Amino acid sequence: MSHIYIFTGKGGVGKSCISSAHAYMSARQGIDTLLVSTDMAHNLGDIFETKLGSEPINLMEHLDIYEIDPNTIMENDFKDMTAAIKKMLPVSYGENIQEFGMVPGMEELFALLKIAKIYQANTYERIIVDCAPTGETLSLLKFPELLSWYMEKLFPIGKVAVRVLSPISKQMFKVSLPNKVAMNDIEKLYYELFQLQELLKDREVTSIRLVTIPEKMVVEETKRNYMYMNLYNFNVDGIYINRILPKDINNSFFDQWLAIQSTYMDEIKQSFQALPMYRVPWYEEEIKGINAIVRICNDVLEKGNVFTQVEISNRETFETNDSGYLLKVHLPFVDKKEIDLFQTNTDVVLKIGNFKRNIPLPNVLRKYMIASAKYEQDCLYIQFEKGEGADAQ
């Protein structure tokens, strides 16, 4: 079975270098490996000092590198799907593929769908993903679940809408609803989104790895990133602390920086003690070229079994109790005042800041209501009872 490792973190913390080192080490172990970048500001070619194109290239035995171009993927790999969705958009969006790429989240979505196709082809034993900065990565990972949810809600009326509304929409709004052939393509997209969602959340296949540096703003963003990853039920099973200054640097210029790093190293240890932790030194040279990548492999990666995938946190779970059912959701680093929770006919809707997740309710709970909720020890406990809902703590 193939495995996927996704590296994420704030921009500039060294995700590309860390993921590149993993890919190089994997290939050196004789494992067929693909290193793929979903960041629009690709720099894998710069790190390996080679020119990359719109298709994977072979760098060395057992290692291919690929900088994904979403527009090329949409034109070549998902041509029918993009054509189907474009027909549903106003003319100004549907005229060409570049404008289609302006639809929020679509570029990230098709990059993920491409990775899923590569996984299904079973060409590589390990796929290592160098992701865009945190905010874009969160959009990238939550988009399949979000879009699948909307499509699931709309699909029961989809074919009726095509038959009844298509002539009206074309005449009044200059927007074409999809015909039967297009609906088949959209149904295919829905099916592939479902498969993608299952793949990203399969703890035996996909691991999320956090990359950070010991500085206040970066550590705070890493904690939020970890919380949101848990909100969307991804398995985070490692954290890499990059650019750690040597303690014996013997230069007063760095005294304050050493104190700052020491403070935030302690905070990282306390905050992420459940995760395997890897410390990457601050090198005296630019991380560029094979020799620089080899240094990271020798100094850090060979000291631990970095390709072992570990299930760190549980999925959300439903349990029966004397009052009804209890839903547990693992949510570290949350201020309970930020949690907004409500129930619809089919879902529990959980909002934290600007992020929202819909957790589908099993059929058995459709006649139950949220009676209470409490947050303690990094976990949200939601109690369901028959009858009217009550309060949240």
Image (tube, rainbow, N blue to C red):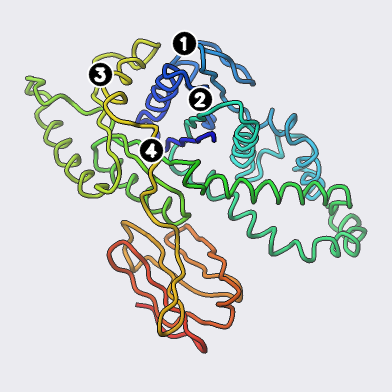
Quadrant in which residue 268 is drawn:
top left
| Of pointers 1 and 3, the one earlier in the residue sequence | 1
- Would residue 351 be seen by someone viewing this image from the given angle? yes
Local SS, label 2: strand
CB atoms of marks 3 and 4 within 8 Å = no
Q: Nearer the viewer, mark 3 or mark 2?
A: 2
Q: Residue at x 34, y 40 (%)?
A: 238
Q: Residue at x 27, y 47 (%)?
A: 272
Residue wearing tag 2: 35
Give the CA separation, mark 1 to mark 2.
15 Å
Give the CA separation, mark 1 to mark 4.
24 Å
Q: Nearer the viewer, mark 1 or mark 2?
A: 2
Q: Horizontal placement of 13 versus 187: left or right?
A: left
Give the CA separation, mark 1 to mark 3.
18 Å
- Can you say which quadrant of the picture contains the C terminus? bottom left
Residue wearing tag 4: 10
